[in-house]
Amino acid sequence: MLWVTDRENQRIQIFDQDGTYIRELKYGGPSSLIIGDRYIWVANGFASQLLQLDLRGKFLAAIGKLGKGVGEFTEAHSVTVSPAGEIWVGDSVGNAVQKFVKKQAGGYRRKTTAEKLLTHARIGARMQSQRVRI
């Protein structure tokens, strides 16, 4: 399957291996996505959110809202997942990168980065975030 983000038309189009159109998912300006082992993560720029979908494309959760604080985006533009499972979201308008880390039993893992760390906060019930200026 080929998943194509189309920010201007506010959709994700899905094609089969032969290029035949299968279906589309409507979201408020998806800029990029990454397909992992368990989830699909979508940087939903116009809606200022990071979306979590299951592998069939069903919506599971949204993280973020419009703003410049931790867990907020002015335009979530790019997303990737590290080998350790950390989710990195680039905010193209806010000139920042946020890192979301899975919850550990009994608390939240704190990470440091080489970049200047602005703040640290818990996002949702299962993740924490760091916001760094670039």
Image (cartoon, rainbow, N blue to C red):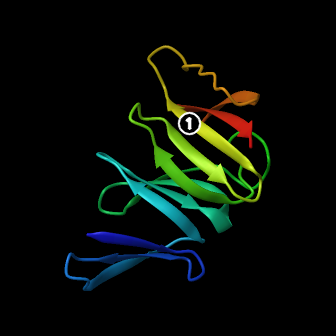
In percent of width and height, residue 48 lies at 67, 59
Does residue 20 appear to the left or right of 131 in the view shown?
Answer: left
Q: Quadrant of residue 75?
A: bottom right
Taking the view exactly as shown, the residue that stands out farthest to the front is 114
Q: Residue at x 63, y 22 (%)?
A: 112
Q: Residue at x 25, y 86 (%)?
A: 20
Q: How many marks?
A: 1
In percent of width and height, residue 26 lies at 49, 75
Q: Is residue 11 above or below residue 100?
A: below
**For the residue labelled by badge 1, is the local secondary structure a helix, a strand or a loop?**
strand
Residue 125 shows in the view: no
Taking the view exactly as shown, the residue that stands out farthest to the left is 18
* Residue that carries the numbered disc 1 in the rendered image: 100
Inspect the image, locate mark 1, and give the three-letter code of the amino acid beneath it: Phe
Q: Residue at x 48, y 35 (%)?
A: 86
Q: Residue at x 44, y 17 (%)?
A: 105
The residue closer to the viewer here, 124 or 22, is 22
Taking the view exactly as shown, the residue that stands out farthest to the top is 106
Does residue 40 appear to the left or right of 93 in the view shown?
Answer: left
Q: Is residue 58 above or below residue 121?
A: below
Residue 98 shows in the view: yes
What is the crowding at mark 1: few (fewer than 14 residues within 10 Å), some, or many (at least 20)? many
Identify the image quadrant of the N terminus: bottom left
Q: Quadrant of residue 76?
A: bottom right
Does residue 94 appear to the left or right of 45 in the view shown?
Answer: right
Identify the image quadrant of the C terminus: top right
